[in-house]
Amino acid sequence: MYETPITGLVLSGGGARAAYQVGVLRAIARLRRGTAASPRRSPFGVICGTSAGAINAAALACGADQFDATVEMLSGVWQDIRAEQVYRADSLGVIRSGAQWLTMLSIGWLLARWRKARPRSLLDNAPLAQLLERTVPLQRLPRMLSGRHVQALALSASNYSASMHVTFYQAAAPVAPWVRAQRVAVPAELSVAHLLASSAIPFLFPAAELDIDGRREWFGDGSMRQTAPLSPAIHLGAQRLLVIGAGRVHEPPGRRVDNTGYPSLAQIAGHALSSIFLDALTADVERLQRINRTLTLLSDDARVATPLHPIDALVITPSQRLDEMAARHVDELPPTVRGLLRAVGVSGSGRAAQGAALASYLLFESGYTRELMALGEQDVQARRDEVLGFFGWPQAPAAA
């Protein structure tokens, strides 16, 4: 049985940046083992994920009866990951996807006159499906739900066909679907196809087809049009939230970036992806904090009359800029991928790197992901007392 009050875990998107989330979870698991009581089951009753965060979320839900072991399994995957496990990095694969896609951008009007060339994305993520089949045992999810090891799992995707944000969820008990402006919730038997759809970063990875209301429709990354990323966890019964982002939410005041000329396609794409993955989460957390403050100003009678109730939320996001971290590892990408990224403006390394923000989402290489995980562990350790207080975990008694 999951712990009460029910803690919801919200994992945002970010491609390779999601390795940071696993570092945070690893540190939390270590903290819990150091408390007076450390059950093996997951501390999260509701788990929600988007994009690469959906992959981490699904793995955690499917291993909810063995939380520590599942976190270590995820750690092993992320710390040894290689780009070719996520997308085709061989010459043929890059030529068939990225090179053709860039050609269509430049002289597509000419090609369209004599050839049916319809490249779908910059990269072909076919290898990711095989990785998910090996590492996310979704066949265990019904058992985890029926055994009350977890209450619900939700994965979000963006419906290209209907211009709608969709949250697919699977729960232990019936939960009525909710409908809001431009976003809906749909009960479903979650599958690898849902994970591929949720993590289909626009332009970088191809869209995926899913069944919805008896129709086949196209879906992409769930971070798009996700105006309320905290909402699914609350609808599914979470009474407090741990939110783990995959990008720095607040920049230091006064930070400036040198003007190096007109921005490249890579710089613009990196900025756009950061907006997709970060802005909605920041806005929704601020909205939750405002509601909590407003509720404290109400009288007891007024609080009883409103359907709103305070939600305690702990938000953990990277303390360092991940694009600057990625710049130190760009050279670890396969040569074919580096060449493709150079074509859109990713160049240099270290402090001289340009367009590193885009690379930070595609750097599925162990040097980068291990540094991300170490940062996640470091950030939790820096907020150790706050984390323990959020979960209500007592300190283990000192040895005599």
Image: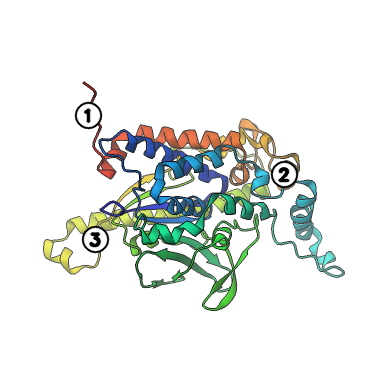
Q: At 32% from the left edge and 56% from the top edge, which residue is drawn?
A: 288
Q: At 58% from the left edge and 36% from the top edge, which residue is drawn?
A: 368
Label 3: few (<14), some (14–19) or many (≥20) C-alpha neighbours in 10 Å: few
The percent position of residue 76, horizontal first and vertical second, equals: 53, 39
C-alpha distance separating marks 2 and 3: 48 Å
The residue nearer to you, when weighing 76 against 376, is 76
Circles 2 and 3, Cβ within 8 Å, touching? The answer is no
Q: At 39% from the left edge and 62% from the top edge, which residue is drawn?
A: 232
Label 1: few (<14), some (14–19) or many (≥20) C-alpha neighbours in 10 Å: few
Q: Is residue 299 above or below residue 81?
A: below
The percent position of residue 187, horizontal first and vertical second, equals: 44, 70
- Residue under pointer 2: 337
The percent position of residue 188, horizontal first and vertical second, equals: 47, 69
> Mark 1 or 3, which is nearer the eye?
1
Q: Amino acid at mark 3?
A: His
Splitting the image into 4 quarters, where does residue 114 fall? Answer: bottom right
